[in-house]
Image (tube, rainbow, N blue to C red):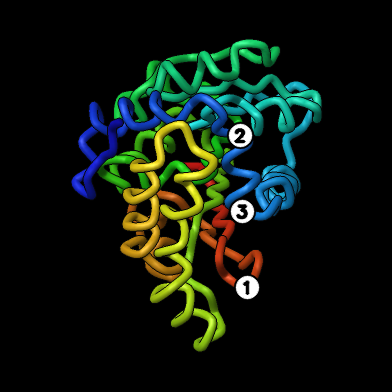
Amino acid sequence: MSRAGLDKNPREVAEMFDGVAEGYDRTNSVMTLGFDRRWREWSRRVLDARPGEKVLDLAAGTAVSTVEYGESGAWCVAADFSLGMLRGGAKRPVPKVAADALHLPFRDGAFDAVTVSFGLRNFEDTEAALREMARVVRPGGRLVVCEVSSPTFGPFRAVYKRHLLKVLPVVAKRVSSNPVAYNYLAESMATWPDQRALGEIVARAGWDDVAWFNLTGGLVALHRAVKPLD
């Protein structure tokens, strides 16, 4: 069984996700108590993809979210650097591309919007990845990031960090094809920046009009931004 370290070596992260690809969607639903569906719905609303637009769904995994975004009439492509995850979504009828988030195989300004759900914290260099996303989006194009965050209610935040994160690997032993990978998941969640800190990283990467709002009491946050026109 494979798991990545918090240095987020790309090869180790890819191998880890290859190892969890089998049953990944089911595991997500179990471990989030079904909230993953609600978070995807909010991401879809905020993205607000329109017919004729081109949307890059980065770290798309098995392309569940890509299919949902495409229901708007936009042309949506799923990109991920785990071949195992892409194979896991082989039956989903959207284009799929194996891609490194730090070196995307797309021309400048190719997309109207880019979105990443629960994948940003797995990139080796968060700011560099956000800059690369900006490169492939047209001026005036949109960014939507759905990612774990910091609960806003103090007592719940303390329980979350001290206890709930420790439960994830235990649950994973029962439902995941690679339970040791969820030790990394818990560690990456515990060390991830809070809402404001991530917003500052997004802004440093060259995005404008950065804003965020909380879902499920701040367990998850949606960040959105716009690429400058000049």
Name the residue beneath numbered marker 2: 25
Is residue 167 in view from this perspective? yes
Give the mark nearer the N terminus: 3 vs 1.
Answer: 3
Is residue 200 in view from this perspective? no
Left or right: residue 6 compared with residue 222: left
Give the mark nearer the N terminus: 1 vs 2.
Answer: 2
Disc 1 from disc 2: Cα separation: 23 Å
Q: From the viewer's perspective, is residue 27 above or below residue 20?
A: below
60 vs 34, nearest the viewer: 34
- Residue 170 in picture, x, y percent from top left: 44, 55
Q: Which residue sits at x=47%, y=46%?
A: 172
Left or right: residue 66 compared with residue 11: right
Disc 3 from disc 2: Cα separation: 11 Å
Q: Sort mark 3 into few (<14), some (14-19) or many (20+) by Cα contacts within 10 Å.
A: few
219 vs 102, nearest the viewer: 219
Q: Which amino acid type corresponds to the residue marked 3 in the rendered image?
A: Thr
Name the residue beneath numbered marker 3: 32
Give the mark nearer the N terminus: 3 vs 2.
Answer: 2
- Residue 13 in picture, x, y percent from top left: 30, 33
Checking the image for residue 48, the label placed there is none
130 vs 161, nearest the viewer: 161
Query: Considering the numbered disc 3 on the image, is that residue within a helix, a strand or a loop?
Result: loop
Q: Which residue sits at x=71%, y=25%?
A: 67
Q: Which amino acid type corresponds to the residue marked 1 in the rendered image?
A: Gly
* Residue positioned most to the front: 174
